[in-house]
Amino acid sequence: MKDSARSGQETGSAAGAGAILWLIASGKARSRSALIEASGLSRSTVTERLAALFAAGLIEEAPDAMPSGGRPARLIRLNTAFGVTLCADIGESHVRLAITDLEPRILAEAVGSVDIRRGPVPVLGWIVEQFRALLAGIGRDSGDVLGIGLGLPAPVDHEGGRVVGPSVMTGWDDFDIRSWMRRHFDAPVAVENDVNLMTLAEYRRFWPNVGQFLYIKAGTGIGSGIITDGRLYRGAQGAAGDIGHIQLTHAPAPLCRCGKLGCVEARAAGWAIARDLRGHGIEASAARDIIALTQAGEPEAVRLVREAGRVLGEVTSDVVSVLNPSVIVIGGTLALAGEDLMSGIRELVYQRSLPLATRNLTIAPAQSDLSTGLLLGAALLVIEMQTRPETIESTILRHQRPRAA
Ligand SMILES: [Zn+2]
């Protein structure tokens, strides 16, 4: 009696609807029948929870219907107009900003050259100012903001909302980014490592039904993001996937920018290839310069990129042995070198991993746009964070306001 009264109460509660919303938001179930199957709930419970979500304005029927078994199934998606996300890609020398809807699609964007070495307060202050201007530009205000997603080029303590032991961000170590942002902008804030956001964007948009997924970013720096059972794996301190500073011992062991010898980065990152090119009298400083050189057919650049592919393949094969992913995606600027980079990775992974681990393994280049992928990943993170069963109630309350009929 007591139990049934409690479950009856939960049926209509926002928290109960949160599990349904999560299935819709993550793309795992988009129709009523798929929701019933994925949630294990009865048809009447799913219908009731959907009604609560429709009433709150959180979901809508998608305009296009997909045929299933002769009868068109009505697809459900997040109401893209329910709110917007504010996203920032904080790079080492520039910050890229965007407002997205809940698709997510970019509604407005801005880029500024900001040196993160100036420390967190000037950089975050600039971001808050720009967010306000961008919102005003599209006729929205802070009440429309579902949340803020910030991507940073450092290990991030996601729960604590701060960076930990950054190699290129003096003054940011342990600074409470989330609390600072919340004092200056009234919206939930998610702070995440940049590679994890690129991983999330690539995974949710192009491989949503793969359980075990590895994303490797090969750019001016090197890192990786891990999805296990459909969720980002961050590790105990947020340092999971930091493959750039795994030391390979074979000689020669060049000095890394982290101070150690022989790191993967010091052998294969854009900055290291540029260093070697300069050693041959060829001008280059970042991953973009290397791609321009390979596209121009500069033989030394092609040779160094191929060699970098083999170094990446060596460390990737070790990761394959630990994680047994079914899909590995190679992204970042160096991935624009195509087969010159990919062939070395494939060669070493297939040579060094156990046959069981590579039998059904796909290794593919990234499909996300290099300049907007990270921002869309930040938007996806905010959407996930604010549509979870434990946050959905406060999200609905925050957004309850009179709506035009
Ligand atoms: Zn290193």
Image (tube, rainbow, N blue to C red):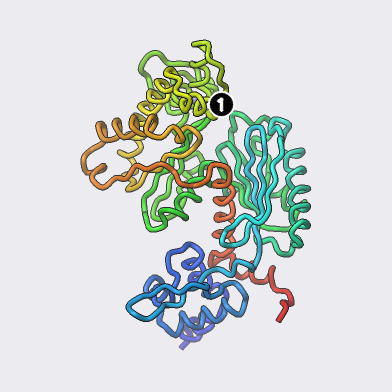
User: Is residue 133 toward the left or the right of residue 90 in the image?
Assistant: right
Kind of residue at disc 1? Ala
Dot 1 falls on a residue whose secondary structure is loop
Label count reads 1
Where does residue 297 sit, x and y in percent of width and height? 44, 23
Where does residue 158 sit, x and y in percent of width and height? 57, 47
49 or 104, which is in the foreground?
Answer: 104
| Relative to 290, residue 382 above or below | below
Q: Which residue is mark 1?
A: 286
| Relative to 158, residue 16 above or below | below
181 or 267, which is in the foreground?
Answer: 267
Q: Quadrant of the C terminus?
A: bottom right
User: Is residue 214 toward the left or the right of residue 288 in the image?
Assistant: left
Where does residue 187 sit, x and y in percent of width and height? 70, 58
| Relative to 20, residue 283 above or below | above
Quadrant of residue 401 within the rendered picture: bottom right
Where does residue 136 sit, x and y in percent of width and height? 78, 57
Residue lying at 77% horizontally and 43% vertically, measured from the top left: 125
Residue lying at 52% horizontally and 73% vertically, measured from the top left: 63
7 or 72, which is in the foreground?
Answer: 72
Residue furthest to the left in view is: 355
Question: For the residue with label 1, is its CB less than 8 Å from the closest atom of ligand 1?
Answer: no
- Dot 1 surroundings within 10 Å: few (below 14), some, or many (20 or more)? some
Residue furthest to the front in view is: 296
